Amino acid sequence: MKILKNILRTSLIAALFIATTATAQTTSYTPTAQNIQAREEFAQDRFGIFIHWGIYSMFAQGEWYLQNAEIDKREYAKVADAFYPHKFDAKAWVSAIKDSGAKYICFTSRHHDSFSMWDTAESDFNIVDATPFGRDVIKELADECHKQGIKLHLYYSHLDWMRDEYPRGRTGKKIIGRDTTKVNWPEYYNFMNRQLTELLTNYGPIGAIWFDGVWDHDEDTVPFNWQLEEQYALIHKLQPACLVGNNHHITPFEGEDIQIFERDLPGENTAGLSGQSISRLPLETCQTMNGMWGYKLIDQNYKSLDTLIRYLVSTAGKGANLLMNVGPQPNGEIPAAAIERLKGMGEWLRANGETIYGTTAGDIPAQDWGVTTRKGDRLFVHIFNCNDTELLLPLTCKVKKAFTYADKEPVKTKKCKEGIKLLFPEAPQGTDYIVELITK
């Protein structure tokens, strides 16, 4: 196995050299036709599932346990020897996610704790070599995603709390066992690129690489050079249709294909992580189903199904995708509470998905009563809260017809100076009361 890995590593280094040499002179990014098409498809998908899973699940304290507990990295690494997720079933995962109405999965290939969830030749600290489980989780997920028609995106951490070569930023400083004399950015950068080459060479089409961690050096007195342009060029060289996104919490950089917002809708910043302006790129907001990204035993504060549906609708109303997170248990199962909500969202989307998939942000910005989405001449009015039998819509377009989406019952309208009013026999009720308008 090790001989095979060394041969593979040599091949990948050669491929990496060729790819980076061919793109080293790039001064500006022009997306390919395949990439533009992938962006358009991404913007139509509207719903994806984030999966945070690694050896940190064994501690049941969330994905930042190594950092938050300030423990010895060598002691932390020992848990890999007991990681045996015997109930992991790629088919069951992908089937449940597909049934939820989600169009893609974003899986954590390597989080900040440096543990790789695939059979990498670049480190023995991976799920095949370091655990008794010995199976390539990403290979099984990729195969099942391709089989079931679900796109696979891969999260990849730019920062690393375990590897000595990584120049520590504002996190990871209290982790025990780091040798600061071995900091070597070129070595670490090349390590990352060789791993990315593996992921984009050995697992079929990858929908996106979802980076995280640039914020680790946002307090440096001298701006840190992540060499992102060359890394993005490598990705686009290996798979032109692969989208690049970076959860850096700032304006998108050259070479990025989507813009990410964390724990907030675009244009909002309640969590303090999404104050950046909104670009013209396809948008995605990531949000937890409960409080944590990775599995945490005591975190059973799951958002209600109504809340999750309204968040999905509100995200579409902003013209963005929702990437909703689940954190599998250490045995490889998705928690029952998460499965229950995935099932409920799937039922809702089978009835109402036409008002979400392939839509753009509606004509009316988000209001206290709800949001709007648009598809051609059809404007969908999503009403969450309305205690009156009248609802004013500040529209300038002409409304030819109005009816309830669920049962196609006509809804009376009345023109007024401010736009039009929807007139109901009684105040709208339910999680999302949808009125469809045919406009001109």
Image (cartoon, helix red, strand yellow):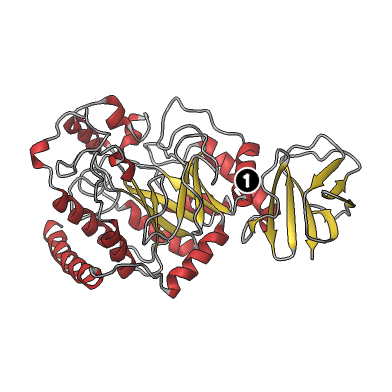
- Judging depth in this view, the residue of 213 and 163 nearest the camera is 213
Residue under label 1, please give it.
314
Residue 134 pos. (x, y %): 26, 48
* Residue 202 seen from this side: no
Q: Can residue 375 be seen in this view?
A: yes
Closest to the observer: 2 or 178?
178
Question: x, y percentage for residue 329?
Answer: 41, 36
Query: Which quadrant of the rendered structure holds the C terminus?
Result: bottom right
Q: Please name the residue shown 74% across and 37% down the image.
A: 385
Secondary structure of the residue carrying numbered label 1: helix
Task: Identify which residue is drawn at 44% across, 24% down.
Answer: 298
Q: Which amino acid does label 1 sit on?
A: Ser
Q: Where is residue 91 in the image (x, y as percent from the top left)?
A: 45, 54
In the image, 287 versus 268, the foreground residue is 268
Where is residue 303 drawn, in percent x and y? 57, 34
The relative height of residue 27 versus residue 428 in the rendered view (above or below) is below
Image quarter (top left, top right, bottom left or bottom right) of the N terminus = bottom left
